[in-house]
Image (cartoon, rainbow, N blue to C red):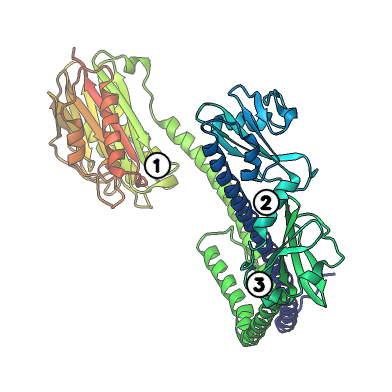
Amino acid sequence: MKRKLPTIASQLNKWLLLIMVLMFLLTTALSVVIQYKVTMNDTERLLKVSIEDEIRSLTHFVSETQLLGMYFVKSYLQPGYTDLDLIPYYLDCDEASIIDENGIVLESTNKNMIGVDLDSNDATSGFFKELREKKELLSPIPQSAGDPSEIIQYIGTELDNGMYVMGGFSQDSLDSIISEAVTEFISSRHVNQNGMLFIIDENNTVVSKPYDDSSQDIDKMFEGREIHGETREIREVSVNGVTYYRVFDTISNFKIVAVLSQKRVMENIRINLILSSVLGMILFVTLFISVSMLMKRKVTRPVKEIAGTLASITGGELDEKVSVRSSSEFETISEGINKTVASIKKHIARETARIDEELRYAWEIQYSALPVLTEGLKNNRYFGLFSSMNTAKEVGGDFYDFYMTDEHTLVFMIADVSGKGIPAAMFMMNGKATLRDSIVSADDLGESVSRANVRICDGNEAGMFITAWVGVLDILTGELRFVNAGHNPPVLIRDGKAEFLKMKTDLILGLMDDAEYQTQSLKLRKGDILYLYTDGVTEATDTNSGFYGEKRPIAALNGISPNEEDICGTVCRKVSDSVAQFAGGAPQADDITMLCLSIKGSG
């Protein structure tokens, strides 16, 4: 059973209610989720960046202090290195050593290091190798605490005599240096405007914090507590009922902690939620105002869509379909139109297939009626022939003919039937057969064409006609007798110069059965070329609807040499190429037929 579609009004009511509810819920939910995630990501990034900047600044400050001490040591040791025990005093380090250019410890405050090869020592090989390259080097401060007595950092420089002086710092010494640096280091630093930075030691005692009222409760945050979790991990901590977001990282035995008040963070989320609610209210008001517009769209737009599709269908676009399914009424209209068009398409397809088949048979019949060059005609030592026909449709109304009536007489002709398509092709077949029969059975060419005209006029109820040019050549004498029944004048090419043949033009065939046709004559000589054509050549058009005309074929054929082996084919191809170049892709409007005769010699 076919489902019953809802009406337009009921659909609009449901859509409006659904849109209002969904938009409110979706806007609120997305605002909460997005704002919370964005704010928390920004908070975490801010805390991490603050710690990174603090560690970078502290490390740089400590390193500069250590390098400054090394400058004093280097200056002191230039004359010699007899007072090596004074180096730890200047550097606050645990041991000092003098090393030769081969990495062998020559003298050290740590007697166990004397004679040690630093290149083979696991603890110093990497540092000393880099020191050779850079001439002055301080190893990085370790991020996490180790054995207090173990040497964990090295500083070294090259002396002017090629020796090296190197100092080593234990965890305790390094902690002492950092402790002196951090006491006042972040007294004026904050995280944004509402957060704080502070440093605690291994006993969770705050050793450096901002000097303002905002840090009064910082000490309480670590009373009896340890900082847990991974470094650079954001966590919530509570102090006297106040919640903070906290991130920490380590440098040596110290922890640098950044905190930001949760209250301040949540204020941004609340502000954004208020803005989202206001925007939601504006959206709902807009939806109510849009109800009338929605009604118009639900009724007017489908009607216009159907009308547009029908216009395309009536314009020939039968593949178009009406696809309006917004309501039961429009669905019924769409299905009815689509079924009708589908039925029309099937009928047209059947008729098109039938017509195509008939046209194919007509084309085969028409082309089979045209003559072909036999060996006797193709290799004749007195003349050469070439012919071509290019129809504008599947079948056309042009035709040509040539044949020998005896051993020394050649009959050839070209003709153009009025109209195109199958009627013209059928009239062409009749006219061609009539002309051949009449010319064979009569000695006088003009009388033969007159008799043919009578037969063509007989029963010509359609009022069709034929323009024709008929020639009879005596190949022994070169004498050409011809009749022009309203056809285009041929082009005579003699001594390389092309010009239209001057002649009298008689009435076209098929109009008046009492018309008379006069035989004219011309003496052809060796090297002459006669080019015959239909008006499809001179009346060919370009993309601007301009005509090819009569000057262009003359220009194309001037200068033709009769000595080429296939001179007749060359002549026809030259004109064809000229026409195609002139047309520039414009569709062919009429049949184009050509026939060319060349005189090789005479008997």
Q: Is 322 situated left or right of 525 in this image? A: right
The residue wearing badge 1 is 396
- Residue lying farthest front? 82
The mark lying in front, picked from 1 and 2, is 2
Q: Nearer the viewer, residue 139 or 50?
A: 139
The residue wearing badge 3 is 211
The picture quadrant where one finds residue 196 is bottom right
Label 1 close to label 2 by CB (< 8 Å): no
CA distance separating discs 1 and 2: 108 Å
For label 1, the SS is loop
- Looking at the image, is 418 positioned above or below residue 100? below
Q: Amino acid at mark 3?
A: Tyr
Q: Position of residue 314 (x, y in %)?
A: 53, 65
Please report the residue visible at 26 percent of the width from the left and 34 percent of the height from the top.
575
- Looking at the image, is 302 positioned above or below residue 136? below
Q: Amino acid at mark 2?
A: Ile
Q: Position of residue 52 (x, y in %)?
A: 65, 56
Labels 1 and 3: the sequence-earlier one: 3
- Residue 26 visible to the viewer: no
Q: Nearer the viewer, residue 70 or 541?
A: 70
- Looking at the image, is 21 positioned above or below residue 404? below
CA distance separating discs 1 and 3: 106 Å
